[in-house]
Image (tube, rainbow, N blue to C red):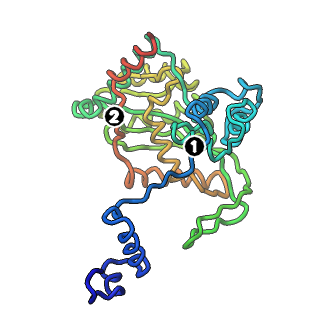
């Protein structure tokens, strides 16, 4: 700009700036000199809450509403702001301020998730170690003619038919699904997971009981007739622990080693992961006119799952991690 031959519009284009920005910068340079390159001091709005008040809000968020005489089951930012005012933490505090405090403290009192807590005793340690050993050695066991199988059921899948067809997704619009539906009964779905390959197989059962389970066991285990030993992992469901089921296995399949997941630890069964992945692809948003239609859909879906998605699950919870977890809770 010190050069008289400089054309401001050309300089603005070269710098990718507006002409007014160029002139404003020149005026600032005349007033401040080279300090113009430094950003101006912006103190912003001063905090209205002291650090102690912010900690009080965080402590309130970590407490139960019943502790301050409220009957609600959990906090929201608005209810926290109201409780903070009533307790005298701050005479005036908005829910947006509470939201900022919770965000800075990484607190999310509005969220929760279910969790099954097993009893960390010697029985849990023993049962979990056997199952985790099978997962760690699945590939090596397969190489020597042994196979690790996981079984689990998805009982009472509701056969729902939407009263009106869904509206497909379009640019700018998500898929819309009719809220009302008609029920056509339920279907029980049994799945088998071959751990070292991630391949699955499914059966639709008339009822989720021991008799229907024992009816498909010959076919389920017959797929592995050449295996020297089968490690069968499932939870302690009534059809699994039934004396008739165990006697059937011990009498007809002495090479089958049955392993039960510990109480409240069915998540150790990899077939639960399989069912969750399968349902996400093949059951969500479904609409079926009758029970036979859903059964036909399930029978056609598991072979497709094997072609498109099947792979061994990456299982990171090893025996050493399990023992460390149990030891921490026994202290």
Q: Secondary structure under badge 1?
A: loop
Front: mark 1 or 2? 1
List the residue tagged with mark 2. Answer: 225
Q: Residue furthest front?
A: 31
- 35 or 8, which is in the foreground? 35
Q: Is residue 171 above or below residue 36?
A: below
3D distance between C-alphas at marks 1 and 2: 72 Å
Identified at 60% across, 52% down, the residue is: 294
| Disc sitting over residue 47 in the figure | 1
Could you tell me residue 96's position as x and y percent?
Answer: 63, 47
**Residue 91 left/right relative to 38:** right
Quadrant location of residue 68? top right
Q: Is residue 67 above or below residue 288?
A: above
**Residue 168 left/right relative to 142:** right
Quadrant location of residue 145? top left
Q: Are dots 1 and 2 in contact, CB under 8 Å?
A: no
Identified at 37% across, 75% down, the residue is: 26
Identified at 37% across, 20% down, the residue is: 129
Counting residues from the start of the chain, the first of labels 1 and 2 encountered is: 1
| Disc sitting over residue 238 in the figure | none
């Amino acid at each position: 700009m010190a050069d008289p031959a400089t054309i401001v519009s050309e300089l603005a284009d070269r710098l990718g700036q507006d002409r007014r920005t160029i002139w404003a910068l020149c005026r600032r340079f005349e007033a401040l000199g080279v300090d113009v390159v430094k950003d101006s001091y912006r103190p912003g709005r001063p905090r209205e809450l002291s650090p102690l008040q912010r900690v009080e809000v965080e402590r309130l968020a970590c407490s139960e509403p019943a502790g301050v005489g409220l009957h609600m089951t959990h906090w929201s930012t608005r209810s926290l702001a109201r409780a903070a005012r009533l307790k005298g933490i701050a005479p005036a505090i908005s829910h947006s301020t509470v939201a900022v405090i919770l965000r800075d403290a990484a607190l999310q009192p509005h969220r929760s998730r279910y969790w099954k807590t097993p009893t960390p005793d010697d029985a849990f340690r023993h049962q979990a170690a056997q199952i985790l050993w099978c997962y760690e050695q699945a590939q090596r066991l397969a190489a020597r003619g042994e196979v690790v199988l996981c079984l689990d059921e998805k009982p009472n899948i509701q056969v729902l038919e939407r009263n009106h067809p869904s509206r497909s997704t379009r640019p700018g619009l998500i898929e819309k699904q009719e809220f009302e539906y008609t029920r056509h009964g339920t279907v029980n779905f049994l799945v088998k997971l071959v751990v070292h390959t991630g391949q699955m197989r499914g059966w639709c059962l008339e009822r989720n009981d021991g008799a229907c389970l024992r009816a498909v066991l010959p076919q389920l285990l017959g797929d592995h007739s050449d295996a020297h030993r089968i490690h069968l992992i499932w939870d302690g469901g009534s059809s699994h622990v039934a004396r008739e089921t165990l006697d059937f296995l011990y009498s007809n399949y002495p090479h089958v080693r049955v392993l039960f997941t510990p109480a409240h630890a069915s998540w150790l069964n990899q077939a639960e992961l399989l069912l969750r992945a399968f349902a996400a692809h093949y059951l969500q948003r479904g609409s079926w006119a009758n029970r036979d239609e859903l059964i036909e859909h399930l029978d056609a879906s598991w072979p497709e799952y094997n072609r498109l998605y099947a792979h061994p699950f990456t299982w990171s919870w090893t025996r050493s991690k399990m023992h460390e977890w149990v030891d921490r809770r026994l202290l």
